[in-house]
Image: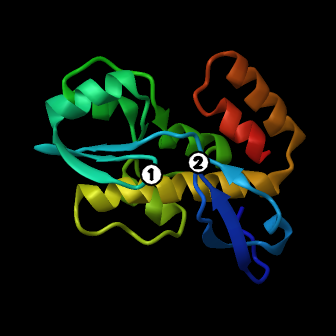
Amino acid sequence: HHPSSPSTDFRVVRPGETDLHLFSMHPVALAQRIVLPAAPALIAGTAKAAWLSPDGEIEVLTRNEAATRAKTTPPFLCHAKSVARRLNIPVFPAYDVLELYAFARPAIFCLPTPRGLARALDLVTPGGGIEAEASCLIAAVEALLQELSLARDAEARAIAHAMERGGWAWGEAVLRAL
């Protein structure tokens, strides 16, 4: 569901941030604050990996360095099994943005890549390699949580509660948005 009325500024705040990022969104959401988990974003390329810290610092790492970090700090990523395979490690705790997409937009197709998420969410398609894809993941999370904040869906809230109790990484962020 895409808001169809005129857009206005929407505040998105990451924990610990002092600056507000403004995004275009439906006027009803004007006062709603979306809080993202304090997590880095990880893109595992074929040769290197990009690690975008919660404070916005981007690093290009070896896949071994990225694997070590990912095992200790659950990151935002796109397609957990694929990322783990590229890092040559078992699947690890993470915020898989595809899971959030599937919750926010059940049964709506999306290519399982950062570019696919960008296209499905009408975001700027990342150019410039894995660093841009890492930033795109954050934008996708923000867009999906904003969308959920407009839903006011009691059934979605009940499902999110059950999933959070089951250990779903997105549980807290989704419940805050709903």
Task: Identify the residue position indicated by label 1 in the image.
Answer: 55
Residue 86 sits above or below residue 7 on the image: above
Q: Residue at x 72, y 17 (%)?
A: 165
Q: Does 175 sit above or below residue 88?
A: below
Q: Is residue 35 left or right of residue 98?
A: right
Front in this rendered view, residue 112 or 26: 26
| Residue 93, placed above or below residue 127 | above
Q: Quadrant of residue 63?
A: top left
| Kind of residue sitting beneath label 1 | Asp
Q: How is the image coloured?
A: rainbow
Q: Is residue 169 left or right of residue 165?
A: left
What crowding class fits label 2: few (fewer than 14 Cα within 10 Å), some (14-19), or many (20 or more)? few
Which percent across, then down, holds residue 61?
18, 42
From the viewer's perspective, tell me whether residue 149 is left or right of residue 145. Answer: right
Toward which corner of the image does residue 79 lie, by quadrant? Answer: top left
Identify residue for label 2. Answer: 16
Going by the numbered disc 2, the residue's amino acid type is Gly
